[in-house]
Amino acid sequence: MTWADFVEWLYQNKVVLIAVTCSVVGAGGCLVGLRAWLQGPMCRSKARLDGKTVVITGSNTGIGKETARDLSRRGARVVMLCRDLQKARTAAEEINKETGNPMVVHHLDLASLESVRNTAEILADTEQNIHILINNAGIMMCPRWETKDGFEMQLGTNHLGHFLLTMLLLDRLKASAPARIINVSSIAHTQGKMHWDDLHLTKDYNAKTAYCQSKLANVLFTREMAKKLQGTNVNTYSLHPGVVQTELGRHIHQSVNGFIHWAFHFFGNFFFKTVTRGAQTTIYCAVDETLATQTGKYYSDCAEKQPHPLALCDDDARRLWDVSSELVGLSV
């Protein structure tokens, strides 16, 4: 085909070409719009945190790190509690260079009650006030591992470790009121239930079942704690951050074949939230002024949402509180 023939062909088929071009552009625009919608809203509050101390678990990477960055920008003194001290110190130095505000790092292994107690003791000795506690760290869909105290790893890390840490810091939070306690849960709680006869799933372990149970526990804990803290001006919040492309899903990747692993990353990079967007609901619960009179509720995409009916069961919330207190060695 000569150049003249090609030009003639383009002229004769211009309607088809225009339709195809519009279809391609339209499809691309739809995908871009879908991706923007899936990213969710940003926290719009401009609240400052000058003079406030924020404690965040698991804040050396992912949404925890982005939460620490945002709250440091607002003037907070941020205390990072992390298992990997080297990563935490690197992240703290990076944020400090950006914001100029103090960053403190302490070791915390939520899979060890001894570590939780030691860290809480350090905080009691070094932090005069704690205005915001963000229980962010977690583990997802891991093999059947146990914590150092013999708990199923996901329940032990995602709930029991944070339960003990929160209880040990309550006096400091009350003394610093108004204060907030934020538990990062997940929409996975809607598929969970409390296996009261076998909380640690020793008889029939399933990684997803264990994860969903631990996330339901986060919401129930938040609900019961709100009741027990009435009149203290310490408010509680649980939340779903969204589907975020972070290291949290690393154990899922290890259990699938190469194609599924590739597809997960390929589509995840396009459709999942970035860590910055994934941190927005946590930030919203930490700073938004309209939430100052709210407590015990569940949030997603910077708005209050209705959790699963099982998460609203007061009997289960009380029972979980009592069982958790016994398991971590606290008097009920």
Image (spheres, rainbow, N blue to C red):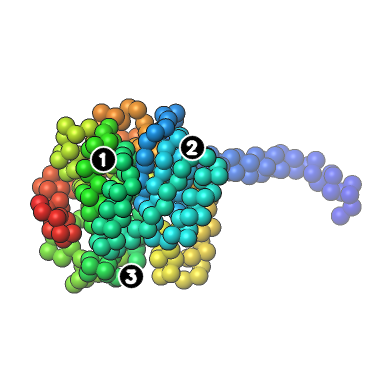
Residue at coordinates 89% horizontally, 47% vertically from top-left?
4
Horizontal side, residue 262 vs residue 120: left or right: right
Picture coordinates of residue 272 (x, y %)? 47, 50
Amino acid type, mark 1 = Leu
Horizontal side, residue 76 vs residue 325: left or right: right
- For marks 2 and 1, the one nearer the N-term is 2
Tag on residue 73? 2
Badge 2 element: helix
Tag on residue 173? 1
What is the CA distance from the residue labelled 3 to the residue labelled 2?
38 Å
Q: Point out the frontmost of discs 1 and 3.
A: 1
Q: Point out the frontmost of discs 3 and 2.
A: 2
What is the CA distance from the residue labelled 1 to the residue labelled 3?
35 Å
Q: Which residue is mark 3?
A: 143
Residue at coordinates 33% horizontally, 44% vertically from top-left?
127
Badge 3 element: loop
Q: Point out the frontmost of discs 2 and 1.
A: 1
